[in-house]
Amino acid sequence: MITPGSELSADAELSCDVCIVGSGAGGSVLAAGLCQAGLDVVMLEEGPYATRRDFDLDEQKAIPMLYQDRGTRSTADLAITVLQGRSVGGSTTVNWTTCFRTPERILEHWRTVHRIEGLDAASLAPHFDEVERRLNIAPWPEELANPNNRKILEGARALGWEAGALRRNVKGCADSGYCGLGCPVNGKQAMHLTYIPDAIAAGLRLYSDVRAERVESAGGRATAVHAVVLDRQSGRPTERRLTVRPKVTVLAGGAINTPALLLRSGIEGQGRVGRRTFLHPVVGIGGLYEEPVLPFKGAPQSVGSHQFVDRGPDKVGFFFESAPLQPMLAALTASLIGKEMARFMGALPNLGVMIALLVDGLLPEDDGGVVSLRPDGRIRLDYPIRPFLTEAMGSAHIALARLTLAAGANEALSLHHKPRRMRDVMSMTQLAEAPYGAHEHAIFTAHQMGGCAMGPDPASSVVGTDHRLHGVDNLFVVDGSVLPTALGVNPSETIYGLAHRARGFVGEAV
Ligand SMILES: Cc1cc2nc3c(=O)[nH]c(=O)nc-3n(C[C@H](O)[C@H](O)[C@H](O)COP(=O)(O)OP(=O)(O)OC[C@H]3O[C@@H](n4cnc5c(N)ncnc54)[C@H](O)[C@@H]3O)c2cc1C
């Protein structure tokens, strides 16, 4: 049953076995398993319950409805645009469907550096097998790649670089390209079409438009979740309150929001909550092609390259994908101004954009960003762009420009506020001399990770390998915030897999 908060006619108090805050990748996979095991589960979701009836391809409506902060979330210095979902299904409702298992080299890094035992490819395999089956995760045929993605393949082949088809969680995909605005044909196997209906069929009580504001705890146990009903249109809090008194509480509000909820609840985990927040910061290069590329049409991501994901122990690696360019998203993420913005938007049909996602959190000195609270309780995200990241941004720009020209573009252009335009390899010296970092060029993130890092030691992590908060017996975190580093691949499948594995730990705690 899904109840919009607006249907609560009075303040309400509920009790249950498990209260899950957040209905995204982590919360939904967990909820389905717990409900199917016979537990009484209440889920709170601050966003609306939106379905294909609401998904009419209108960016002006979809972005404020389906994204955190109505699509305006960013780092405190406004240097990085933060794309993050906010509706039933969480970021899976708007994500671009690329699915990867957690790379073995990352699991090995977690074992050796973060001392996380029991998370290896073999032990995770049954969980990944199961979510891949449920979400229909499979390679997207190379011949269906849209021109924007095909350019990565063509450029990589010309340069002798590795590149290949990506796997997607779709069934009956109409190839519209509108994944980021909510799938209009129910092709994307997002949570609101898969694990949430599974959970509801097994008894889940889901309240949408309800934001958990605080977890009450006493004597090392969480005792209640205090929530407020939001107005669906404005997203602002109303006077109406919902209090849940569960045996076990699970936070699954995603990176950034889950640490903020803990901080608001006075749970700071020895000062670790909110620290080690990673973003896979994204930089891009545009390519102007003779022929139309129509970057707003067709599966947004279907080809990727991991040629530079491991650049050795002293450098930040990066991997390549492309991004869909519907007009509003293009404008939001390109960060150009005035005439340059008009020129960029005017060229949209013939423009391709390849992106590099930086793999943050692997160097010993890279402890990422910090989530904290502003004096009025709102979220603040600081993410300093340190020299090892600016070096990677510069190297990524050069590699992307090479890839773009090798793919046949007439011109490669950087998304610096004063764009650098290149027609041949010689003109790329401009990129070597260009500045990199905050406020120099467009940077965005669609992959938020960390803030409640997993690990055995309360002095350096927030949750144990069983997702249980150190020091609070019946409080768990099951979402992207537990990742101790970025992944070097798109994170959704790792979060699905970890949530599938966490079902046992949470169930046992009831
Ligand atoms: C535009 C975009 C494209 C992406 N593309 C891909 C891709 O192609 N492949 C991939 O692997 N990943 C992709 N991602 C990222 C991926 O979807 C996320 O990493 C993943 O969904 C995160 O899962 P989660 O459970 O941590 O949080 P989410 O899925 O974000 O869910 C968290 C939910 O909790 C709710 N919530 C938060 N705080 C509260 C509160 N206090 N009370 C009640 N509810 C709350 C939020 O509203 C949200 O609905 C993309 C993301 C975006 C935004």
Image: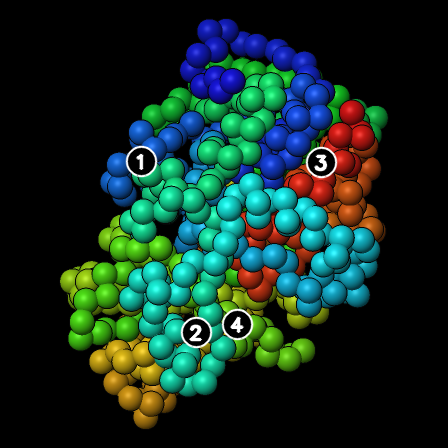
Q: Tell me where residue 371 appears, x and y as whole percent.
A: 58, 48
Whether tag 1 and tag 3 are in contact, CB under 8 A, the answer is no
Q: Which residue is pictured at 56% across the width and 16% down the height?
A: 242
Between circles 2 and 3, the one closer to the viewer is: 3
Q: Residue 485: which disc?
A: none
Q: Out of 161 and 79, give the one closest to the viewer.
A: 161
Q: In the rendered image, which quarter contains the C terminus? A: top right
Q: Amino acid at mark 3?
A: Arg
Between circles 2 and 1, the one closer to the viewer is: 1
Q: Which residue, given by chain and number where applicable, does mark 1 sit on?
A: 55
Q: Tell me where residue 475 appears, x and y as whole percent.
A: 74, 32
Q: Which residue, given by chain and number where applicable, does mark 4 sit on?
A: 306
- The image shows residue 129, relative to residue 433, as above or below, that is above
Q: Which residue, given by chain and number where applicable, does mark 2 sit on?
A: 436
Q: Gap between marks 1 and 3, in whole Å? A: 31 Å
- Callout 2 crowding tier (Cα within 10 Å): few <14, some 14–19, many ≥20: many
Q: Which residue is pictured at 61% across the width and 21% down the height?
A: 202
Q: Out of 39 and 213, give the one closest to the viewer.
A: 39
- The image shows residue 142, relative to residue 74, as above or below, that is below
Q: Which residue, given by chain and number where applicable, does mark 3 sit on?
A: 503
Whether tag 1 and tag 4 are in contact, CB under 8 A, the answer is no
| Of pointers 2 and 1, the one earlier in the residue sequence | 1
| Of pointers 1 and 4, the one earlier in the residue sequence | 1
Q: Secondary structure at mark 1?
A: loop
Q: Is residue 350 left or right of residue 380?
A: left
Q: Out of 200 and 424, give the one closest to the viewer.
A: 200
Q: Gap between marks 2 and 3, in whole Å? A: 43 Å
Q: Secondary structure at mark 3?
A: helix
| Of pointers 4 and 3, the one earlier in the residue sequence | 4
